[in-house]
Amino acid sequence: MTQHEFESLKKQFINADVDTKIVLYTNSDDLTSDQYKDLLRNYPIEELPKLEDALNALE
């Protein structure tokens, strides 16, 4: 994913509701670990269990 594509995804992520953030996070395959971390900085910490559940369901 190019930096421009990531910035577009990040903007969409920031403006999304929690359920959409989860979909974007779990369905974005071409991100670097730093890009995943960058998205997490914009995820509400109190909702982390929902994201963890979604990630565990992928395994």
Image (spheres, rainbow, N blue to C red):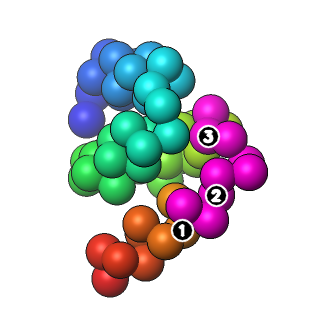
Question: Horizontally, is 15 left or right of 9 in the view?
Answer: right
Question: Horizontally, is 33 left or right of 6 in the view?
Answer: right
Looking at the picture, which amino acid does disc 3 mark?
Tyr
Is 13 magenta? The answer is no
Q: Which residues are magenta?
A: 42-50
Q: Which residue is located at x 39 percent, y 21 percent?
A: 12
Q: Are marks 1 and 2 in contact (CB under 8 Å)?
A: yes
Question: Residue 43: which disc?
Answer: 3
Q: Are marks 1 and 3 in contact (CB under 8 Å)?
A: no
Q: Main secondary structure of the magenta part?
A: helix
Dot 3 surroundings within 10 Å: few (below 14), some, or many (20 or more)?
A: many
Query: How much space separates mark 1 and mark 2, taking CA atoms?
Result: 6 Å
- At mark 3, the secondary structure is loop
* Residue on which the image places disc 2: 48
Name the N-terminal-most of marks 1 and 3: 3
Looking at the picture, which amino acid does disc 1 mark?
Glu
